[in-house]
């Protein structure tokens, strides 16, 4: 059974990502950030276990923390519209993690574009308004800038940031053991 996997990533803070540029920004991939100031970005991938998301959101609210969620589109369904709206209303970021979690290095540009647009459509439907997905996290952390034109597909859809990680912990029950 798939589960929501918290990934603690030393990446660019969400606020920095949001101010790093607009539609004319060049395409960037982030593994980590060289910074003189300590920063941490907490992200959650897949988002299948919605009860975990509710608990995470409660903790974020208690401690004044903002996170970035990278759900697969198949997990964004109408029955959970209130949860996705809460994520947006509380100031968290949502990024795209594809619709069905494929290894994108095996996809054509068209297939990747379809994965991304299906996720965008699912999110827009539950929020009943357009939400600008601009962050992309490749499933399994695998991507290649040139294979099958995938990076061109990301740029075509106005994604300017590929967010990967270098610290990964898949079990939220013992994340700091």
Image (spheres, rainbow, N blue to C red):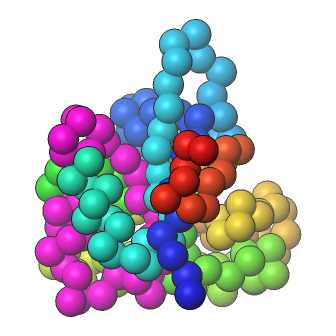
In front of the other: 89 or 160? 89
Quarter holding the N terminus is bottom right
Q: Quadrant of residue 166?
A: top right
> Farthest top residue?
36
Quarter holding the C terminus is top right
Image height check: is 14 above or below 168? above
Give the x, y percent position of residue 100: 57, 86
Q: Quadrant of residue 19?
A: top left
Give the x, y percent position of residue 71: 45, 71
Give the x, y percent position of residue 98: 55, 76
In front of the other: 175 or 69? 175
Image height check: is 148 above or below 155? below
Image height check: is 46 above or below 118? above
- The answer to whether residue 17 of the structure is visible from this angle is no
Q: Residue at x 60, y 61 (%)?
A: 170
Give the x, y percent position of residue 142: 76, 64
Q: Magenta region: which residues?
A: 60-88
In front of the other: 171 or 102? 171
Residue 85 in the magenta stretch? The answer is yes
């Amino acid at each position: 059974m798939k589960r929501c996997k918290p990934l603690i990533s030393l990446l660019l803070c969400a606020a920095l990502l949001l101010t790093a540029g607009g539609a004319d920004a060049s395409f960037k991939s982030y593994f980590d950030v060289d910074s003189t100031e300590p920063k941490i970005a907490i992200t959650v991938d897949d988002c299948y276990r919605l009860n975990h998301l509710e608990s995470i959101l409660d903790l974020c609210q208690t401690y004044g923390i903002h996170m970035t969620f990278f759900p697969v589109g198949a997990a964004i369904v109408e029955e959970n519209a209130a949860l996705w709206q809460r994520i947006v209303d509380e100031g968290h970021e949502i990024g795209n993690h594809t619709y069905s979690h494929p290894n994108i290095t095996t996809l054509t540009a068209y297939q990747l574009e379809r994965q991304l647009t299906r996720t965008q459509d699912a999110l827009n439907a539950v929020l009943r308004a357009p939400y600008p997905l601009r962050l992309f996290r490749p499933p399994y952390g695998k991507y290649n800038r040139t294979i099958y034109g995938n990076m061109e597909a990301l740029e075509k859809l106005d994604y300017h940031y590929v967010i990967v990680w270098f610290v990964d912990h898949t079990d939220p029950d013992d994340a700091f053991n």
